[in-house]
């Protein structure tokens, strides 16, 4: 083996190999660093991280100039709901069911000397979308009490806006729970029913006056007139940062309340940019690979007579190509290790910077980065070996 | 075919063999081309030829690095056209040893390294035996000289030692003594015959006038 190496190392061009090593190192480092950066930054934009957690979206159809004037319903048809359900980025879809009767709510307390009444409405959504946990959240027709959930920002509006301005006392959630509301339901045909209402909680997620679904079904049957299409939907999405998401809604003219799809768009651009960077790295890798192949071809060509003679005195092909295979595999391995090191060092640098803005997991140097590096190393080495073996007869 | 790899080689048979380059020649007078005959292990054969009659082609056919011939060449009972690279590796390591006319030494290695290159592969001779052969052939003082600095006659002896560093059934010598004086030629002949006899091998020697002094079972005119 020593003698063979002594024979075959002649004509090895150091400058060519150094040229290959440098370009390959640059290419490999760019690819690995881009992947590592992607693995580091992606959780920030995917729903797994708390930072952008907003898995529920409320969608409506745009209210246009004419749709407001026409009597045609602006609701979602069953086929539209089914299509939504079949999208990969949507986990669940729930419809807001509106009340089909008039509601009059009031609060009268002679002790406090307060009395107010207002016309209002009810909506209901399936329980799994509700973010308020309460034992009182149930209804049966024999009860005369309806549990109600209000949007949290109603309470905030009152406490921090109205109460201060008009010298009224601020109200806590617990206090509100003690208040009994007088609810008057008026059917389309004029029939009336008196009920009690109790506020059981405040929702951050749902911007509506909610009652339990069983109540709504019962009341709509009792006092309503026929069924209508839901005009608002609540959807649970699997990944808020999915770039397809905002595009899909936009194409169909759906509006998302409190547009939370910024993350989706940022993540989309991030993926494009990282994709470009990875492509550049891959192109450099490919170019360096060609340098290596040309260099090896030249080397084999220069040493072809020796290789042929070695084969003639009985050396098997595997033995004569082995020195070149070793040379290439060890060169590739060194490049892999150095580029992993570069990636690691660069990562600690950018982590300091990003860590100031986002909480990122410092401990994990992604195993995937190493696997990708090893994958590229194996791929290039196997390709090299195949080319060498093909060249030497 | 696989079995063949286990066997020793007893016979090389030629059947109507002809180098393609001679295909159109009408008045070809040859004991070898277009004939049917066999070379048997244990016998010595001399092939006498004028230059340009296909002597080196013959050597390259039975050593498996050219196949530009018509007809067949058969080892034992296997047609060598069916051989793959690994079969030839086996043939070149254990069955046929060839002294190339052009020697095929590596000029950038020393004489001894050239021999070692072969012996490292076969592990057939001990270093001591190699030293003895160098001494016997009168180039004991040239062992550590680069081959490129040696005369052709000296190089011929190095190649000769190298081709003895392996087991073989046939020793094929392509003009083995073209550049040796008579004394060295007979020393070489004795050494080659001794090694061949030890292995029970056959010798096939070619010559264009200066023949290796051995007792030949048969002489062919190419």
Image (cartoon, coloured by chain):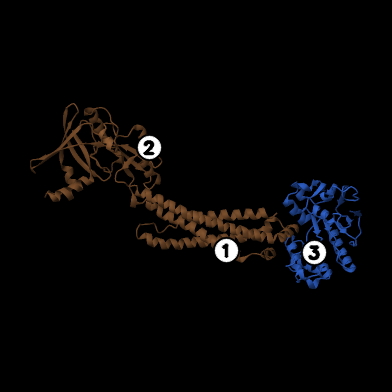
Residue at image location 65% in from the left, 55% down from the top? A388
Contact (CB < 8 A) between labels 3 and 1?
no
Q: Chain of mark 2?
A: A
Q: Which residue is the site of mark 3?
A: B159
Locate residue A74, reporting x and y percent: 29, 34
* Residue B27 locus on image (x, y percent): 91, 49
Rendering colour (chain A): brown
How far across and down, in percent of the image, does residue A35 sit?
46, 55
Which secondary structure lies at badge 3?
Answer: helix
Judge depth for marks 1 and 2 and give the one in front.
1
Residue visible at 15% across and 41% down in the picture: A179
> For the residue labelled by badge 1, is the local secondary structure a helix, a strand or a loop?
helix
- Chain that is coloured blue in the picture: B
Q: Residue A85 bears which disc, if any?
A: 2
Q: Nearer the viewer, mark 2 or mark 3?
A: 2
- Sequence order check, earlier mark of 1 and 2: 1
**A365 and A288: which is toward the camera:** A288
Is A201 left or right of B208, judged from the image as shown?
A: left
């Amino acid at each position: 083996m020593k003698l063979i190496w002594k024979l075959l190392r002649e004509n090895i061009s150091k400058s060519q190999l150094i040229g290959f090593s440098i370009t390959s190192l640059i290419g490999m480092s760019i690819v690995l660093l881009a992947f590592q950066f992607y693995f580091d930054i992606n959780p920030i934009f995917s729903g797994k991280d708390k930072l952008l957690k907003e898995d529920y979206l409320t969608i409506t159809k745009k209210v246009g100039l004419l749709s407001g004037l026409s009597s045609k319903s602006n609701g979602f048809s069953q086929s539209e709901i089914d299509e939504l359900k079949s999208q990969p980025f949507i986990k669940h879809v729930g419809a807001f069911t509106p009340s089909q009767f008039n509601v009059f709510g009031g609060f009268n307390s002679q002790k406090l000397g307060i009395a107010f009444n207002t016309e209002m409405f009810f909506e209901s959504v399936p329980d799994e979308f509700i973010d308020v946990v309460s034992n009182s959240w149930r209804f049966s027709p024999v009860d005369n009490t309806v549990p109600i959930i209000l949007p949290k920002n109603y309470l905030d509006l009152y406490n921090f806006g109205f109460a201060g301005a008009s010298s009224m006392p601020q109200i806590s959630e617990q206090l509100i729970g003690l208040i009994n509301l007088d609810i008057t339901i008026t059917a389309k045909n004029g029939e009336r029913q008196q009920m009690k209402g109790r506020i059981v909680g405040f929702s951050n997620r749902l911007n509506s006056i909610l009652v339990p679904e069983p109540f709504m079904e019962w009341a709509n049957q009792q006092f309503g007139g026929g069924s209508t299409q839901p005009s608002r939907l609540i959807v649970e999405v699997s990944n808020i940062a999915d770039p397809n998401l905002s595009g899909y809604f936009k194409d169909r003219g759906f509006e998302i309340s409190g547009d939370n799809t910024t993350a989706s768009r940022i993540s989309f651009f991030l993926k494009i940019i990282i994709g470009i960077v990875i492509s550049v790295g891959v192109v450099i890798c490919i170019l360096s690979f060609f340098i290596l192949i040309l260099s090896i071809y030249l080397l084999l060509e220069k040493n072809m007579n020796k290789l042929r003679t070695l084969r003639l005195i009985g050396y098997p092909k595997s033995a004569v190509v082995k020195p070149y295979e070793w040379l290439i595999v060890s060169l590739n391995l060194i490049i892999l290790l150095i580029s992993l090191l570069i990636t690691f060092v660069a990562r600690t640098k950018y982590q300091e910077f990003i860590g100031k803005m986002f909480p990122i997991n410092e401990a994990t140097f992604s195993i995937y980065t190493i696997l990708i590096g090893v994958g590229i190393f194996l791929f290039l080495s196997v390709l090299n070996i195949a080319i060498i073996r093909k060249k030497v007869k | 075919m696989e079995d063949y790899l286990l066997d020793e080689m007893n016979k090389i048979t030629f059947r109507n063999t002809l180098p393609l380059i001679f295909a159109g020649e009408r008045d070809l007078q040859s004991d070898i081309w277009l004939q049917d005959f066999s070379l048997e292990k244990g016998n010595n054969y001399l092939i006498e030829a004028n230059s340009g009659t296909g002597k080196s082609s013959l050597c390259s056919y039975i050593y498996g690095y050219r196949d530009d011939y018509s007809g067949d060449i058969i080892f034992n009972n296997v047609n060598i056209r069916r051989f793959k690279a690994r079969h030839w590796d086996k043939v070149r390591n254990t069955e046929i040893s060839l002294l190339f006319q052009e020697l095929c030494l590596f000029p950038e290695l020393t004489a001894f390294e050239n021999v070692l290159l072969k012996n490292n592969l076969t592990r057939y001779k001990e270093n001591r035996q190699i030293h003895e052969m160098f001494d016997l052939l009168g180039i004991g003082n040239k062992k550590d000289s680069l081959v490129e600095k040696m005369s052709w006659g000296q190089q011929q002896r190095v190649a000769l030692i190298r081709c003895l560093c392996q087991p073989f059934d046939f020793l094929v010598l392509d003009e083995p003594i073209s550049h040796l004086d008579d004394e060295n030629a007979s020393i070489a002949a004795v050494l080659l015959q001794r090694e061949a006899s030890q292995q029970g091998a056959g010798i096939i020697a070619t010559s264009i006038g200066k023949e290796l002094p051995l007792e030949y079972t048969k002489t062919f005119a190419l």
